[in-house]
Amino acid sequence: MSGARRIVLAVLRVAVGVVFLGTAFQKLSRHASAVADFRHWGLPSPSAFVYAIAIVELVCGLALVTGLATRLAALLLLCDMLGAVATAGRVDGGRSILVPPILAALLLVLAARGGGGWQLLDRLDPPPDARRRLA
């Protein structure tokens, strides 16, 4: 992978991860408001659903920022964004129909291409060409 491509993917990975960390903290800190939104969108057990989605976004956001299991985290968050389009986007439209597909497209890039450079996983298990250089 070229150096520029690794940098672009790494910046994208961290930026998207920070977005999801922010939304997770927002759901947890403004739980009552998030529950009202989830109820409005017709989701079952809105309080439990808010906690579940916030945990997924928190764990996967951290995974993206650190570069640990980037592709899996991106796929899980992609499902989250498809759910957002199907619920909030369908009911409210506007920003709720615009932002989730954009994030979904970025997550699809990360799932397909990986997270680029500066990933924790690189430190734990270097790629084969790096192992040859270390030997």
Image (cartoon, helix red, strand yellow):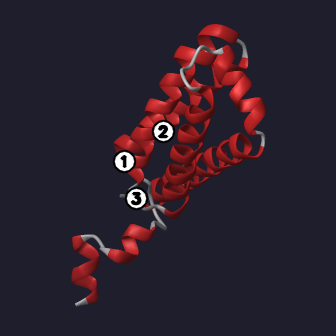
* Label 2 sits on residue: 77
**C-alpha gap between disc 3 and disc 1:** 23 Å
- Mark whose residue sits in front, 2 or 3: 2
- Position of the N terminus, as image quadrant, is bottom left
Circle 3 SS class = loop
Q: Which mark is residue 2?
A: 3
Left or right: where 63 falls relative to 91: left
Circle 2 SS class = helix
Counting from the top left corner in percent of width and height, residue 45 is at 56, 26
- Position of the C terminus, as image quadrant, is bottom left
**C-alpha gap between disc 2 and disc 3:** 26 Å
Residue type of the residue flagged with mark 1:
Leu
Q: Which mark is residue 37?
A: none
Q: Is residue 82 above or below residue 90?
A: below
- Mark whose residue sits in front, 3 or 1: 1
Q: Which mark is residue 72?
A: 1
Which quadrant of the figure has residue 109?
top left
Q: Is residue 134 above or below residue 111?
A: below
Residue at 69 percent of width and 29 percent of height: 35
